[in-house]
Amino acid sequence: MKITKEKRFDDYEELLSVFGELDANVSKLSKAFDVDILAVDQTVKIIGERQDAERAYEALCKLCEISRKQVVKPATVDMIAECVKNGENTDVNDILKPVAITASGKIITPKTFGQKKYVDAIEKNSIVFGVGPAGTGKTYLAVALAVYALKKKRISKIILTRPAVEAGEKLGFLPGDLNEKVDPYLRPLFDALQDMLGGDAHLRLIERGELEIAPLAYMRGRTLSNCFIILDEAQNTTKEQMKMFLTRMGENSRIVVTGDITQIDLPAHVASGMKHAIDVLKDIEGIEVVRLSSKDVVRHELVAKIIEAYSRFDKREESRLKE
C-alpha cells in the first residue's frame, strides 16, 4: 500500500539546494528508493510503498541537514541513500567528518558509502585490506589518513611501498639510482603525497626520516614500529611477499593494503598474495577487508561504466569456458 510523506521547507533556497541542478539530486533519490517525489510550492511530497517512502523521507531530511553546511552533490545523495538502505549510522556530522585537508586547503571527505566504510575501517583496525577497481580512492584516502596521523603525531613515520612487477622488469635493469628506479612504480603515491603536502614537501619529510618510499623487497628483516604503512598494488605480491610484509608490523603501527584483484600482473602460475591473505586472515579481530566497487569510482563517470563492462565481459568468458 502506497503512502505519502511530506516535508515542508521554510527556506526556498534550501529546497533548491537539496533538489540540485535540473533536479539531479531528487531524481537520484527517487530512483534509489523507487518513489515519486513532487514539490508543491515549498512542500515536498514523497509517494511510494510504506518502507520505501519512509526511507526516502529519512534520506531527504539528512540531505536538508547537509545542505545547510555544504553544496549537496549527486555523489552525496548516493552515499546517503545507501547508508539509509543499509541501516547504517547516518549522523550528518559523522558523514561530513573531514579525512584531511590538502595543501591547497581542499577538505577531503568520503564521497561514497564504500569510501566511508573504508575510512572508518582504517581508523578502527590495525590492518585493513582495501580491495577495488581503479578510481575508488583506495590509495588517495590511505595516504591522506597517513599524512593526517603524522601531522597529529600519532605516528613518527609513513612508509609507502609497492611491488615492482607491472612492466615485467627488475629494478636492477632500470637506469638511474634507487629513487629513479622506484619512481615509476610509486608515482601514484607521490601524486597523492604532493596533493596532501604541496610541492616538494615530501622530500623534506624524507630528509627528516619521517617518510620512506621503497620497493617491497626492502621491507625484509625489519620491524616497523610507530609507523603508518601503505602497501599499494598488493594484488601483485606473492604469498611469500605478503606474509613477509604483514609480519614486519611493530608496536603502534597501522597497515593499509590496497589492490585490485581483477588486475593481477603476476605470471599465470603464481598465486596473488593479496587474494590468499584475505582468505587466510578474514576472521582475525583487528583485520578488516573493505571491498569497493564501481559505485565508489570518483573519477569520470565513464570509468565506472568501463569497469562494469569489463566485469560483465569477464563473467561471460568464465561461463563460456566452463561450458
Image (tube, rainbow, N blue to C red):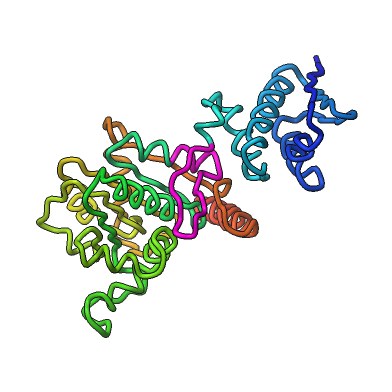
- Front one among 268 and 81: 81
Q: Looking at the image, which residue is at 27% across and 85% down?
A: 175
Above or below 71: residue 54: above
Seen as rendered, the residue at the extreme right is 41
User: Which residues make up the magenta segment?
Assistant: 96-118
Horizontal side of 233 relative to 262 (left or right) equals left
Residue 41, horizontal then vertical, whole percent: 90, 29
33 or 150, nearer to the observer: 150
Q: In percent of the image, x 54 and y 55: which residue is there?
A: 314
Residue 313: % across, % down:
58, 56
Q: Is residue 108 magenta?
A: yes
Q: Position of residue 227 (x, y in %)?
A: 22, 49
Image side of residue 138 versus residue 287, left or right: right
- Is 70 contained in the magenta span? no
Question: What residue is shown at x 23% (from left), y 58% (from top)?
Answer: 210
Query: In the figure, 59 relative to 242: above or below?
Result: above
Residue beneath the point at 43% across and 50% down: 141
How many numbered tags mark residues here? Answer: 0
Q: Quadrant of residue 309?
A: bottom right
Q: Position of residue 318 (x, y in %)?
A: 51, 53
Q: Is residue 62 left or right of residue 250?
A: right
Q: Quadrant of residue 267?
A: bottom left
Left of 65 or right of it: where is 134?
left
In the rendered image, the vertical position of residue 242 relative to residue 170, given as above or below:
above
For the N terminus, the quadrant is top right
Q: Please name whichever residue, 178 or 167, is drawn nearer the observer in this view of the structure.
A: 178
Q: Outermost residue, bottom direction?
A: 175
